[in-house]
């Protein structure tokens, strides 16, 4: 069934979806009773209108964006989990048969390394503003990721022109690269691509960036940490694959067969943190779902103090909250780099939203952070 099967007044309502009846009433300048009447007419013609727990109505009429009820989500989640597990097993078998492209870092006195921190791209997510306009989708995500890649390269070139000399690059991928949810057309949240396609896009855009960095640095270290959106678990099931880990594994495999021999992956699929080394300093990467937003609170300070003592990091990185800021624990910087994705219900509930969408900074033999640029998108 297409929109052409409905009257003009009914199509006006369909064009406003997904939204609440109250918002549709305001947009069209008609009463809520009139909106209800048009919806009834749509349903009488066979149009499947559904409503979620937030009173947002949507049309299940052949569009790409769908939601499913929580009653059915467990079944879909279980199947998606099984699918991810099969993909992960296949990928691990492939990686076992190939050698990693490991190149030891080269460092020279007075030179620096470059660190790029990325997190929370949410490929596949669809977001609307308070007027019901679509402000984020997969196409926008791809454009923004590539824009940030180009701006990163431009900033590196600017620093080179300022007589800085760089040896190595550290690309930190902090998780929630994809939005996930499931592998079928009927999705549990507003997303416009299946899980398999989200993974494919994530691999494509980040392989482009890794290839560009490989040309410009002696070595590139790619540090990977999965986020919470990568997890799919049905009730009562044990932990299975994370979609972010599959993106990272595919990137690792592509690098191995590409001929690039100066890339080193630091991957971790067992803990919520990944430790790594750069120019003698200890780095600590988390997605951040198990960390409070404000380190400055007593509870937040205690948590990060414990991690600082346990991991002995010199600088830490986190995401999850889609906000840009730098905080310190024991004079050790903790950097949060923001997101290219506009705020959703989670961020709004915490009154959070702050650009930029990524950060780039230098690290020398003397200091873990010598300079810092926040990277915005247009």
Image: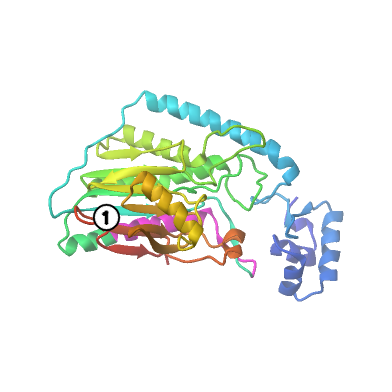
Image x and y of residue 155, in percent? 28, 62
Query: Outermost residue, left direction?
Result: 109
> Dot 1: within a 10 Å radius of its alpha carbon, few (fewer than 14), some, or many (20 or more) residues?
many
Is residue 136 part of the magenta span, yes or no?
A: yes
For image coordinates 59% across by 50% down, the residue present is 192
- Kindly state the secondary structure of the residue where label 1 is placed: loop
Q: Is residue 134 visible?
A: no
70 above or below 354?
above
For image coordinates 36% across by 59% down, the residue present is 359
Closer-to-camera residue (306/4): 306
Image x and y of residue 302, in percent? 46, 55
Image x and y of residue 139, in percent? 50, 55
For image coordinates 51% across by 47% down, the residue present is 178
Q: Is residue 59 visible?
A: yes
The picture quadrant where one finds residue 29 is bottom right
Closer-to-camera residue (231/145): 231
The picture quadrant where one finds residue 338 is bottom left
Is residue 128 part of the magenta span, yes or no?
A: no
Image x and y of residue 11, in percent? 75, 63
Relative horizontal placement of residue 86, taking residue 236 as reference (left or right): left
- The colour scheme is rainbow
Which quarter shows the C terminus?
A: bottom left
Tell me the residue that label 1 is attached to.
368
Main secondary structure along the magenta-highlighted residues? helix
Query: Outermost residue, bottom direction?
Result: 29
31 above or below 341?
below
In the rendered structure, which segment of residues is drawn in magenta?
A: 131-154
Relative horizontal placement of residue 38, taking residue 341 as reference (left or right): right
Relative horizontal placement of residue 172, taking residue 126 as reference (left or right): left
Total numbered labels: 1
């Amino acid at each position: 069934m297409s929109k052409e099967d409905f009257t003009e007044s009914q199509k006006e309502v369909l064009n406003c979806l997904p939204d609440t009846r109250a918002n549709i009433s305001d947009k069209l300048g008609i009463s809520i009773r009139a909106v209800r009447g048009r919806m009834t007419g749509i349903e009488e013609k066979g149009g499947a209108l559904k409503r979620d727990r937030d009173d947002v109505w949507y049309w299940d009429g052949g569009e790409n964006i769908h939601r499913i009820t929580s009653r059915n989500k467990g079944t879909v989640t279980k199947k998606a989990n099984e699918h991810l597990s099969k993909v992960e097993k296949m990928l691990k078998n492939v990686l076992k048969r190939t050698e990693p492209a490991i190149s030891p870092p080269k460092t020279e006195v007075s030179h620096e390394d470059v660190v790029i921190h990325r997190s929370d791209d949410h490929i596949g997510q669809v977001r609307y503003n308070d007027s019901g306009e679509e402000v984020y989708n997969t196409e926008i995500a791809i454009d923004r990721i590539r824009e940030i890649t180009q701006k990163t390269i431009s900033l590196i070139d600017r620093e080179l022109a300022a007589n800085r000399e760089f040896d190595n690059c550290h690309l930190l991928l902090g998780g929630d690269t994809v939005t996930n949810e499931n592998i079928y057309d009927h999705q549990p949240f507003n997303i416009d691509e299946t899980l398999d396609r989200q993974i494919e896009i994530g691999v494509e855009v980040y392989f482009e960036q890794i290839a560009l960095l490989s040309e410009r640095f002696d070595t590139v270290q790619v540090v990977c940490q999965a986020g919470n959106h990568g997890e799919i678990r049905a009730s009562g099931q044990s932990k299975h694959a994370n979609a972010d880990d599959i993106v990272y594994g595919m990137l690792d495999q592509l690098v191995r067969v590409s001929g690039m021999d100066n890339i080193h992956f630091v991957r971790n699929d067992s803990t919520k943190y990944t430790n790594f080394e750069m120019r003698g300093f200890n780095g600590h990467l988390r997605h951040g779902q198990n960390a409070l937003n404000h380190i400055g609170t007593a509870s937040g300070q205690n948590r990060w103090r414990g991690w600082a003592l346990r991991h002995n990091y010199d600088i830490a990185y986190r995401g999850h909250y889609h906000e840009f800021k730098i905080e310190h624990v024991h004079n050790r910087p903790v950097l949060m780099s923001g997101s290219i994705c506009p705020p959703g219900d989670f961020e709004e509930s915490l009154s959070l939203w702050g650009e930029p969408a990524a950060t780039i900074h230098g690290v020398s033999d003397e200091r873990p952070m010598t300079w810092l640029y926040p990277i915005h998108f247009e």
